[in-house]
Amino acid sequence: MAPAPGPRRKGAAGTGYPVLIRALRRAWQEKHLVLFEPRFTPLVAACLCLAEVGVNLWVIQRVAYTEIDWKAYMDEVEGVVNGTLDYTQLKGDTGPLVYPAGFVYIFMGLYYATDRGTNIRLAQYFFATLYLATLLLVFRIYSRTNKVPPYVFFFMCCASYRIHSIFVLRLFNDPVAMAILFLAVNLFLEDRWSWGCFCFSLAVSVKMNVLLFAPGLLFLLLRRFGLRGTIPKLAICAALQVALGFPFLMENPVGYVSRSFDLGRQFLFKWTINWRFLPEDVFQHRAFHLALLVLHFTALALFALYRWHRSDENILSLLKDPAKRKDQPEPLSANHILSQNVRFSCLVDYYGRVQLPEFPSGLGLKVAKAVYSSVSIAMLL
């Protein structure tokens, strides 16, 4: 039956409005709170993602592409396409292939998708899409804390030229590794630790410097599962590395491991930022690297003893089954998982730039700094 003619009661039509329209109307009514209340995180994140679509398209169309590593990446995977599985024989314009097998498979897909790496514009659009996906993953991490004010998002993405440059102008492999790492963090927040470990290992297989986050993950695993429960999670990480590297391990196992997980290479002085004030001979000296390594492990130990582990029991109690510990640990909350990883990210930033001879993951460390400062204030750390 058709509805009777005549004026409707005020507010009746509102019940049929889409959720987005109702959210926008509520946001307008409380517009003075939108940038400060965590409950508006989804709305602010959606607006920023839409803005980022335009920003990335503008950058791709208007700013010149910078060739640094893309051609070298394509040369390296082309060697695999041509049948070379010995890692010591794979190289590009900038030197030998120094990334694990996950990098090879992902960039091999890009090699085919971009007409053997020649369609740079298409590759830029792919990385722009990856950038938006990464933002969504990071925004979701923020929203799970329910502590961070939405205005922080702007400084994390729209205000950063470097992040856009790393993604859509230089096409580095850092964004790929960090996107997978952020996916792993999201899975940890959902208490899906096996899948999270799988994704963490996958991120390591793209770029080795993700390993710098491993001690923080190990601490969380021990606290959540104890030693017996942690071993299967670590086995997932190891099994994936073996599976991805299997063709190369069968051809030349020593060559694969020494090239893709080489901890002995030195970071070049011309790439450093934090230590530019040092003389080059001091920066390149092994004693300086060793000192940073010692400071790194000392800082990790201090955080583990006095910040991360607050139980009256000895820290070795983490090896026990959680049900058998004297002080029953509280369930790991999203805030605890995130804040611990963020603190660890800052330790990585302070000490890790020289210990690993690769570029730092710009997006990951920038996000870590932004999250750390905002979470620290919001959580009164």
Image (cartoon, rainbow, N blue to C red):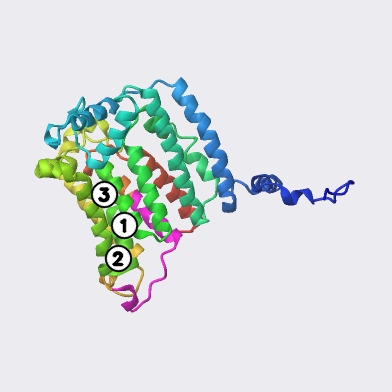
- Specify which label sits upstream in the sequence, 3 or 2: 3
Residue 217's tag is: 1
CA–CA distance between discs 3 and 2?
17 Å
Q: Is residue 369 visible?
A: yes
Residue drawn at (40%, 55%), measured in percent from left and top?
187
Q: Give the image location of residue 130, x and y in percent.
A: 41, 37
Circle 1 residues within 10 Å: few <14, some 14–19, many ≥20: many
Estimate the x, y position of residue 100 in percent, counting from the top left.
22, 41
Q: Residue furthest right?
A: 6
Q: Amino acid at mark 1?
A: Leu
Tell me how far mark 1 sits from mark 3, CA to CA.
10 Å
The residue pinned by badge 2 equals 222
Give the residue type that dot 3 points to.
Leu
Q: Main secondary structure of the magenta part?
A: helix
**Residue 257 is drawn in which quadrant?**
top left
- Up the image or down, 73 lies above or below 238; here it is above
Q: CA distance from mark 2 to mark 1?
A: 9 Å
Eyeballing the image, is 157 above or below 235?
above
Which percent across, then down, holds residue 350?
31, 46
